[in-house]
Image: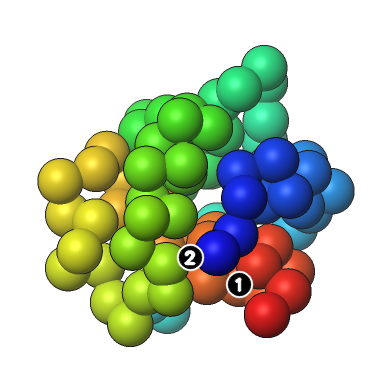
Amino acid sequence: MLDIETVWANVLAHEGEVFRQIRGGEFIYRVKGNMIFPDRTNVQISKNLLQEALAFFPLSNTTKIQHLRGPSYIYAILMDKRIHHT
């Protein structure tokens, strides 16, 4: 299982790079404190939300994380090999 500190270090390392949502939309994000700010939405994703989503990793789609804020962005970040390295 992935741990949040490894994931978060990778999130920080890839800030400003292009990520792709499950339906093909592209976005970049910036990080301020423990918050991720994707450029295509007003939704903010906290480190804690990523940690909650890790309980469902690996994800085949966004269904299991629909209850979380910004599921398509969370999916895009967590399932990217730059972030999870598995």
Q: Amino acid at mark 2?
A: Ala
Q: Is residue 4 visible?
A: yes
* Residue in the foreground of this view, choosing between 10 and 41: 10
**5 displayed left or right of 66:** right
Position of residue 51 relative to residue 55, above or below, is: above
Q: Where's the N terminus, which quadrant?
A: bottom right
Residue at the location (15% across, 46% down)? 67
Position of residue 82 relative to residue 33, above or below, is: below
**65 displayed left or right of 20:** left
Q: Could you say where residue 79 lies in the image, as x and y percent from the top left?
A: 52, 71
Indicate the secondary structure of the residue bearing disc 2. helix
Q: Could you say where residue 2 lies in the image, as x and y percent from the top left?
A: 60, 59
Numbered circle sitting on residue 80 = 1
Numbered circle sitting on residue 52 = none
Q: Is residue 15 visible?
A: no
Q: Do tag 2 and tag 1 residues touch (Cβ < 8 Å)?
A: yes
Numbered circle sitting on residue 76 = 2
**30 displayed left or right of 53:** right
Position of residue 75 relative to residue 23, above or below, is: above
* Residue in the foreground of this view, choosing between 10 and 3: 3
* Residue in the foreground of this view, choosing between 73 and 82: 82
Q: Amino acid at mark 1?
A: Asp
